[in-house]
Image (tube, rainbow, N blue to C red):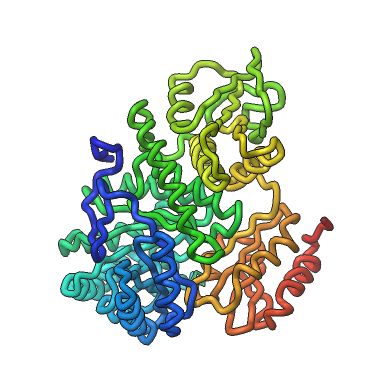
């Protein structure tokens, strides 16, 4: 991967979106998305303005149909009339006609290659001959080139946005549902952009599993480099949820990549008011800038994908292949245990440097200190970004956090949340939840709080809360159970990928989910 010599960021061909430049050396761009129905022009314009005033440099709105895409023109006009020049982005799934309409009204269009021209996944045809596969690709090219021509004519930028869980049957048939499939899904469209000399493109690959997201983005960077493509990268963890868990997952995923110079625009997806995403994103970006500086200074930028667990011998109940241990208070080094103390800024670089060319086989406890951070949210983001990056990299024996802002119990809780965000252990149920958008048909933040309070103690389960039936089921990321918005006031419940209760009244849905879990023998009392 090429780096910008001055600041360590990956070199790319900047994408221009309205007055905004995405790509180094321009600063990392922070964006968010509305949750209002797009056809409600007044509410959508007001929320767009509010998100922009909270500090976002770009705002995305869903456009599920041509009428929604046309409404973006009215929203755009209202936002500009209010003196707000933030570029607007249309979010398109399953509907190329909506993309064509939206490209006339907004500065950027996001398409999902898993369902743009390919039909969404059905698992019905999973066997393609080489000829059939090539013919499908040619069909995509024939349909996509006119769209690129329209975008060129309108000065509209593009995001090729792949999501784990929404790959087409065609891609899965050849590359699987994992990292290779997601990367190929993006590259197919990017190759057409390159061939057509269309350069205002950003690419993203998102997943709700943080380690899948980071590993796949690193693989994408390798794939782009191998093909000589230098498109800027949009980073995000999907279905991160809310509160501490949502912030920690986002900080681990986004922060660990930015610290290695990967990423040009970010969205922290929270199942909360979209304005709440902005301070979280700013904290992640600011901390990552410090980490990147330190990584450049220490020569510790990491390009590669996962290198597996850092090898140590088991001792004192830690190390070897044992679960990551959590430490509070003083952690004395001994002949059996090694302690690495790092102090922010630059914890990642300090630890990488200390463990470079390591021959010591003692288990390693990594303790990160934050003596100068006096804001609790910033502290959470910083610790998650540092320790999460190191855990994902393979330094997994033991971790601790020190800060004057945290009691020992709070520090331990934060460490456990970081470990769970990295997928290394479960201390509570894994609740994944989409952030909601204009397709959401219920008060998602309230439902999420209720689901958490009822089910969080079921730590053997993964439960999804998804705003809509169109994207929700595909993107539930292997959840055991799903609560999915089906229609206004109606919820469908899923067991795995099977819909087992359709269109039940929303007011009954949490109780019915509880009954379902009980009838499956999965319930345990608090
Ligand atoms: S799953 Fe959630 S965020 Fe995604 S399209 Fe549906 S409502 Fe919107």
Question: Looking at the picture, how far across and down is residue 190, in whole percent?
Answer: 26, 60
Tell me where residue 84 sits by quadrant.
bottom left
Residue 520 vs residue 323, the one in the foreground? 323
Residue 32 vs residue 262, the one in the foreground? 32
At horizontal 58% and vertical 63% (from top left) the residue drawn is 433
Q: Is residue 149 left or right of residue 408?
A: left
Residue 288 vs 485, above or below: the answer is above
Residue 153 vs 182, above or below: the answer is below
Residue pushed farthest bottom? 67
Question: Looking at the picture, how far across and down is residue 207, in whole percent?
Answer: 48, 56
Split into 4 quadrants, where in the image is the N terminus? top left
At horizontal 54% and vertical 44% (from top left) the residue drawn is 375
Residue 254 vs residue 35, the one in the foreground? 35
At horizontal 43% and vertical 77% (from top left) the residue drawn is 44
Q: Is residue 226 visible?
A: no
Residue 507 vs 411, above or below: the answer is below
Q: Is residue 446 visible?
A: yes
Q: Is residue 196 left or right of residue 138?
A: left
Q: How many marks?
A: 0
Residue 40 vs 336, above or below: the answer is below
Residue pushed farthest top? 335
Question: Looking at the picture, how far across and down is residue 287, in whole percent?
Answer: 44, 41
Question: Looking at the picture, how far across and down is residue 502, in whole percent?
Answer: 65, 81
Split into 4 quadrants, where in the image is the C terminus? bottom right
At horizontal 61% and vertical 68% (from top left) the residue drawn is 445
């Amino acid at each position: 991967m090429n780096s910008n010599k001055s600041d360590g960021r990956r070199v790319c061909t900047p994408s221009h979106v309205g007055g905004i430049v995405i790509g180094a050396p321009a600063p990392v761009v922070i964006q968010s998305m509305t949750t209002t129905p797009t056809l409600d022009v007044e509410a959508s314009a007001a929320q767009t303005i509010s998100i922009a005033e909270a500090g976002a440099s770009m705002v995305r709105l869903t456009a599920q149909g041509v009428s929604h895409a046309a409404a973006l023109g009215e929203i755009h006009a209202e936002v500009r009339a209010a003196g707000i020049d933030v570029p607007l982005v249309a979010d398109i799934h399953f509907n190329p006609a909506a993309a064509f309409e939206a490209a006339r009204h907004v500065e950027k269009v996001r398409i999902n290659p898993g369902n743009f021209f390919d039909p969404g996944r059905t698992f019905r045809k999973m066997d393609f001959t080489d000829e059939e596969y090539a013919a499908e690709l040619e069909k995509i090219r024939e349909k996509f080139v006119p769209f690129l021509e329209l975008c060129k004519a309108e000065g509209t930028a593009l995001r090729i946005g792949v999501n784990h869980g929404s790959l087409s049957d065609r891609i899965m048939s050849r590359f699987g549902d994992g990292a290779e499939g997601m990367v190929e899904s993006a590259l197919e469209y990017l190759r057409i952009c390159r061939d057509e000399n269309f350069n205002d493109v950003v690419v993203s690959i998102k997943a709700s599993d943080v380690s899948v997201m980071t590993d796949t983005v690193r693989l994408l960077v390798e794939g782009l480099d191998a093909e000589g493509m230098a498109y800027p990268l949009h980073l995000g963890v999907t279905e991160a949820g809310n509160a501490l868990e949502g912030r920690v997952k986002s900080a681990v995923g986004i922060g660990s990549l930015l610290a290695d110079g990967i990423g040009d625009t970010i969205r922290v997806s929270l199942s909360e008011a979209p304005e709440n995403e902005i301070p979280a994103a700013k904290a992640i970006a600011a901390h990552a800038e410090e980490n990147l500086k330190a990584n450049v200074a220490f020569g510790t930028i990491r390009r590669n994908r996962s290198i597996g667990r850092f090898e140590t011998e088991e001792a004192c109940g830690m190390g070897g292949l044992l679960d990551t241990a959590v430490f509070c208070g003083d952690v004395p080094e001994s002949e059996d245990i090694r302690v690495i103390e790092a102090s922010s800024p630059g914890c990642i670089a300090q630890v990488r440097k200390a463990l470079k060319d390591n021959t010591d086989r003692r288990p390693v406890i990594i303790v990160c200190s934050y003596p100068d951070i006096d804001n609790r949210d910033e502290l959470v983001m910083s610790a998650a970004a540092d320790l999460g990056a190191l855990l994902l990299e393979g330094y997994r024996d033991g971790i601790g956090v020190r800060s004057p802002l945290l009691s020992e119990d709070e520090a331990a809780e934060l460490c456990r949340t970081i470990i769970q965000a990295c997928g290394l252990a479960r201390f509570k149920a894994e609740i994944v939840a989409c952030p909601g958008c204009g397709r959401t048909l219920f008060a998602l933040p309230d439902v999420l709080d209720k689901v958490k309070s009822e089910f969080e103690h079921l730590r053997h389960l993964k439960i999804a809360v998804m705003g809509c039936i169109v994207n929700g089921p595909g993107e539930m990321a292997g959840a055991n159970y799903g609560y999915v918005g089906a229609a206004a006031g109606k919820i469908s419940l899923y067991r795995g990928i099977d819909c087992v209760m359709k269109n039940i009244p929303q007011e009954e849905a949490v109780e019915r989910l509880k009954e379902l879990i009980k009838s499956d023998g999965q319930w345990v009392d608090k």
